[in-house]
Image: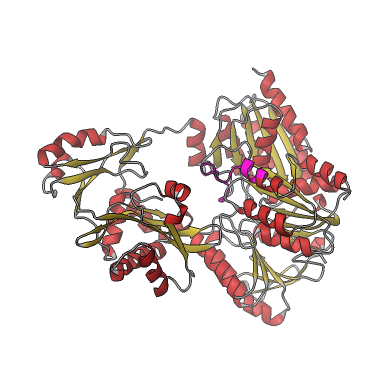
Amino acid sequence: MRLLEYQAKQLFLKYDVRVPQGKLITCADDLDGCFYPAVLKVQVPIGGRGKAGGIRVAKDRSAATTLYPSLLATEVKGYYAQTLFAEETIEIEREIYLALLYDRANNSPMIMASGIGGMDIEQVAHEEPEKIIRIHYDPFLGVQPYMLRRLAKFLQLSDTAELVRVIKGMYAIFTEYHATLVEINPLAETPVGLVVLDAKVELDDKAESSQAELYQALRSEQHFKSSKTLTAAEALASENHVKYVLLDGDVGIITDGAGTGMLTLDLVQDEGGKPANFCELGGLANPDLMHKAIKVVLANTNVKALLISLIGGLTRMDEMAEGIARYLGENKNPIPIVVRMCGTQEEVGKEILRSVGLTPFYDITDAVREAVSLAQKSK
Amino acid sequence: MAILINENTRVLIQGITGTVGAFQTRIMKDYGTRVVAGVTPGKGGSRMDDTPVYDFVAEAAAEHEIDAAFGFVPARFARDAAMEVLDAGIPLQVITSEGIPDRDMLTIIHYARAKDAVVVGPDTAGIISPGKCKLGVHPDKMFMQGRVGILSKSGALSYEVGKELTENGIGQSTVVGIGGGPFWGLSQTEVLKMFQEDPETDIIVMLGEVGGKMEQEAAQYIKAHVTKPVVALIVGRAAPEGAQMGHAGAIVEGKEGTAQSKIQALREAGAHIASRPADITRIIKGIGG
């Protein structure tokens, strides 16, 4: 879950890291009592707000009144804000980039920093990699004093104490909230010290159950609209917790593994077909999940043939066949379904499939060819 | 020999009395895996078939010599279960859980490093050394004993390739599932090193997928250190950018992590590139394996 900027800044404030004075604007009347000239910023859970025109300076209350409706109507990559955050303007001497995150390459948490702030960090990494420092630390022992001195030297900051305060706050947020990213971009050097101008905090949704109340509270505070509308299949998938990625072809695909799912997609493409989706059931699939997955994939009306490719280890073929049979029992004339089945409890599964009129394939390439050809015939 | 496990490996199963745990444990035992003990908190003192069940790993370890642990544990308890295994001094464990929080997984990985223990996974089907030991949920008839080592991120893809090779009379020394990420205990590079050093492995098959840079690192290692032939199959050529393809680690971000970039790195490192399981048979027969 990505926090909105103002939510992230509330966390920084809680941990004694300096942020500009700000006020949440939920209606036009809230524009009273802001610190003018004020920076008005749309609160959406995505970057690129400045480029999209979602950050504007209002010199006074009357300018803010004029800007307010246009900011709410500003689209930022498919999102529209319903709240704004109004902040005092800050005298900036220099902008810095600072982040805490996990480095996938060596399984470690790290501090990443650059003296070039306010830019897209990936662009800096690409164009001037020497301007970025990565300092890995032990997850048990945390950030050591020498690392901070090294960081201060790299960033040419004279006041190490200031930097320590910022990193301490970031570290507290990173560890206490199960964050996967705590990023300040930019961190401004100002006459009064280091100030967080913009912040991005991402929480690890895999840890949601360990902080359910916090998630609920944060979600209830997030008000924005998305112009992205889900298709019927995507909405059904999300409702039923089915792993589903919509694609633009006509061969529907369900697999019981992620790797075999990607392989099936590749093979369909190699055989001249076009996958309509990726859908993987995972190791602990049961008849119910298979039944739901078929409904999800067939909710996409572009699908002309459905290919179910199964190679069970943890997944039991008898249970998968049961789910397929249940679907066929409820839907008498669906589009053609091709099933490839082998693995745990395969014989029982195949028996169930035959009893509902399906002839299971054993070889994946044969099944793929059949599905691609059926989809092409129906055109 | 074989790598990581063999016919002498004594195994502890965490979550042995659950529906899936009991079902899969019976299959492992039927295969010949030496399951010496099980753990389910609250079920200590009972038995799963003839296997004694304990409340804690340390209690089991006090009564039995244990070489490896295998867990059927929900993701939210995975860290606790893994730490218990590490504290009991068990040198190898397989973590099957999917969806373990990042911080928990890194804690496990770092603690394992400190204890000099090997963690395989998470989100893995496990390891099988055909004819010797199965520490996993593989459909075992798709594998047979032989001299090809397989390493795979995806469990199901390793079954697919195992089936293909077995039906063509090509056996395997060990099949290692390293899991779907996004963080990995044992890496592709570490498994490559084990296969390179294993006298019972002649050819290495590496099954990778989109996302991250692990295959690129493996390619560098192959170029510098692997003298045995490597056959690589990278899936996800048809995967769109930005979508999560089932595994937590399988996501193409910008130009990074594409199947194409991995295939190119592996080809440059001298690996034979397969586009589908049947290609692997053809390539191995061509090599003379």
* Magenta stretch contains residue B254: yes
B199 vs A48, left or right, is right
**Residue A373 can be seen in this image:** yes
* Magenta stretch contains residue A338: no
Above/below status of A155 relative to A244: below
At horizontal 85% and vertical 53% (from top left) the residue drawn is B171
Position of residue B270 measured from the top left corner of the image (x, y, whole percent) = 74, 49
Which image quadrant: the C terminus of chain A? top right
Pick whichever, B220 or A73, lies toward us: B220
**Residue B136 can be seen in this image:** no
At horizontal 44% and vertical 60% (from top left) the residue drawn is A133
Pick whichever, A122 or B253, lies toward us: A122
Position of residue A234 measured from the top left corner of the image (x, y, whole percent) = 50, 35
A290 vs A168, left or right, is right
Position of residue B172 measured from the top left corner of the image (x, y, whole percent) = 82, 55
A170 vs B94, left or right, is left
Pick whichever, A160 or A327, lies toward us: A160
Please identify the quarter of the rendering in which residue A270 is found. Answer: top right
Above/below status of A367 relative to A282: above
Total numbered circles: 0
Q: Residue furthest top?
A: A379
Please identify the quarter of the rendering in which residue A278 is found. Answer: top right
Q: Is the image coloured rainbow, by chain, by secondary structure, or in one colour?
A: secondary structure
At horizontal 54% and vertical 59% (from top left) the residue drawn is B100
Give the extent of the magenta segment.
Answer: B248-264
Position of residue B212 measured from the top left corner of the image (x, y, whole percent) = 57, 50
Q: Main secondary structure of the magenta part?
A: loop
